[in-house]
Image: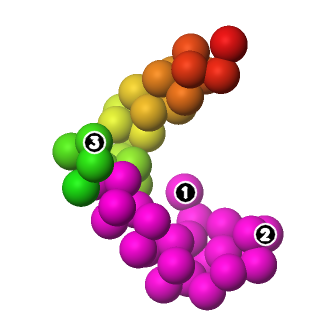
């Protein structure tokens, strides 16, 4: 839940992370920066990968 750490680990600019969050909101109407929507997105992603 830390944008700066995520950007560092992914080797991208923090603005890239924010842009991707915005894109997720546009596509799913869920704000992945909040706990419950993030949990829902992770569950869906896990189900999709099986």
Which residue lies at the image location 32% right of the left edge and 65% below the top edge? 22
Q: CA distance from mark 2 to mark 3?
A: 25 Å
Which element type, helix, strand or loop, lies under badge 1? loop
- Magenta residues? 1-25
Disc 1 crowd, CA 10 A, few/some/many (<14, 14-19, 20+):
few
Q: Nearer the viewer, residue 47 or 37?
A: 47
Q: Main secondary structure of the magenta part?
A: helix
Q: Is residue 13 magenta?
A: yes
Residue 4 x %, y %: 62, 77
Residue 43 x %, y %: 51, 22
First-in-chain label (1 vs 2) = 1
Which residue lies at the image location 66% right of the left edge and 75% below the top edge? 7
The reply to whether dot 1 and dot 2 touch (C-beta < 8 Å) is no
In this rendering, does residue 5 appear at all?
A: no
The reply to whether dot 1 and dot 3 touch (C-beta < 8 Å) is no
In this rendering, does residue 24 appear at all?
A: yes
Which element type, helix, strand or loop, lies under badge 3? helix
Quadrant, the N terminus: bottom right
Q: Is residue 39 left or right of residue 10?
A: left
Q: Is residue 21 magenta?
A: yes
Q: Nearer the viewer, mark 2 or mark 3?
A: 3
Q: Quadrant of residue 33?
A: bottom left
Q: Which mark is residue 28?
A: 3
Disc 2 crowd, CA 10 A, few/some/many (<14, 14-19, 20+):
few
Which residue lies at the image location 78% right of the left edge and 69% below the top edge? 9
On screen, 39 above or below 35?
above
Q: Nearer the viewer, mark 1 or mark 2?
A: 2
Q: Which residue is mark 1?
A: 1
First-in-chain label (2 vs 3) = 2
Q: Which residue is mark 2?
A: 9
Q: Nearer the viewer, residue 23 or 8?
A: 23
On screen, 28 above or below 48?
below
């Amino acid at each position: 839940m830390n944008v700066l750490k995520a950007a560092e680990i992914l080797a991208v600019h923090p603005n890239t992370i924010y842009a991707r969050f915005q894109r997720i909101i546009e596509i799913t109407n869920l704000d992945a920066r909040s706990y419950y929507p993030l949990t829902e997105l992770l569950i869906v992603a896990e189900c999709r990968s099986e």
